[in-house]
Amino acid sequence: MDAVVAGHGQHARRRIPSLEPLVMAASPTTPAAFRCPISLEVMRSPVSLPTGATYDRASIQRWLDSGHRTCPATRLPLASTDLVPNLLLRRLIHLHAATLPPSPSPEQALSQLAASHGEPAAAEKAVRSLAAKIAPGKGKQASVASAVAADLDSTVPALLSFAKGGAGTDARVDAVRILATVAPEIVTYLTGDGTEKRGRVRMAVEALAAVLSAGGVCEDAKKALITALVAGDLGRLVTTLLAAGPTGVVVLEAILMSPVPDADAKTAIADRSELFPDLVRILKEAASPAAILCMAAAVQVRGRPARSSMVRAGAVPALALAVAAAPTAAAESALMLLVEAARCNDGKAAIAADAAEVAAAVMGRMIRVGQMGREAAVAVLWLSCCAGGGERRMREALAAAPEAVGKLLVVMQGDVSPATSRMAGELLRAVRMEQERNGMVASSYDSRTIHVMPY
């Protein structure tokens, strides 16, 4: 390319050499600018925020989806959440990748993973190599699946181990995505008898639970897995999953909540005689939130028969313990299950039989959950104390609960539905009447921790 350069009053001609293609020399280290500030991994799809900072699309999208509206790097508020592809940086990253040694084959990468012996850096390198091959548009998913399926007994435990203790969140998700490519083959491990099969069954259940509960696995892969699960003997499947404990319950709950199985298949699962007794056992032994969610899914599928089965299995005391001690989301689900139990006579009787524990648990958690949990707490108390005359034992237990009046007033004055506010008012009157009957009326609505003006 020629150009004319004028210099200080005299003309001169100088040939400017053609630009050389941009080639980055191979380097043992990756430039810091190529790494996402969130995941610290090399960016696959770099995008920029209005602040000018660039991130990998998957990482920044998770940040935004979790409700953040600031730039992670600059901490500045975002005027917009639009993500603009950084094409130049993407091109530079691709050029850098082209200077690196060829990527190992799936078989070589799996051998490296097996030989890493828990060394995070070596294991992550192998997982990243496999994940890159199953990325959309690469067309190598079948070869990776074939390599993993060739030796499930060694590759699945290695991937599971990395998924539980890998170096970075994105890398752990990649390990689960690789497992998803062979999930239908893993399903076959759920069948078979004999001592040597038990280890395989545990491994298979753990892998399937990881795939079905991971956010980074596409919905089509999860649907294909559930299709494979429900294609066989449902009775045997339920028995196997329940025997696997909390991990198996994760798989069972995913099946019940999926749109893939038809109503008959879900009903067949919810009607299994061992379902609720085993779920109650798992909830008591392992304080498993998944057991609560699975109960809720079965009740949603089957309705009144499932409510009765749940109560007969002894779920009420176990749910009361979960309300008191479980994380917020699980406690809210437990409260809603207690509401379902209180809708039937057997459930009311079971709640009254453990009146002191249920009332203490529900009142103790009432203002430490979200709106949905508060409304469920009021509903279970109203159904037990007021509906159809209520249960005297529950009214006595509620009146004796610490700060019952103050907490009910907080709910009445809070952001709840009119129906919940009305039920809280009726509960308040019932509590006051019970306190008066027993000479327990205090001179003020105030307590040590709650100060609310009464209506």
Image (tube, rainbow, N blue to C red):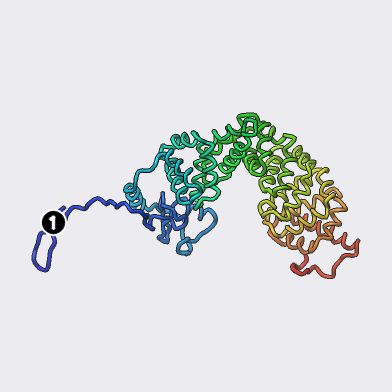
Dot 1 lies on which element?
strand
Numbered disc total: 1
Question: Looking at the picture, does residue 321 appear above or below residue 257?
Answer: below
Q: Is residue 178 visible?
A: yes
For mark 1, does the 10 Å Cα neighbourhood hold few (<14), some (14 to 19), or many (20 or more) residues? few
Compared across the picture, whether 24 is left or right of 207 comes to left
Query: Would you place residue 110 above or below residue 21 in this image?
Result: above
**Residue 118's x, y, as percent?**
51, 49
| Type of the residue with mark 1 | Arg
> Along the line of sight, which residue is nearer the eye, 152 or 355?
152
Task: Give the residue number, with chain letter if any, for mark 1.
Answer: 15
Q: Nearer the viewer, residue 94 or 207?
A: 207
Tell which of 263 and 280 is nearer to you. Answer: 280
Of the pair 14 and 145, the residue shown nearer to us: 145
Q: Quadrant of residue 276?
A: top right
Question: Is residue 97 left or right of 264 when viewed as pictured?
Answer: left
Counting from the top left corner in percent of width and height, residue 267 is at 69, 34
Question: Which part of the image, by quadrant, shows the C terminus?
Answer: bottom right
Q: Left or right: where does residue 169 sit relative to residue 379?
A: left
Query: Which residue is at a point 79% across and 61% down the rendered structure image?
Result: 404
Q: Position of residue 286 (x, y in %)?
A: 69, 48
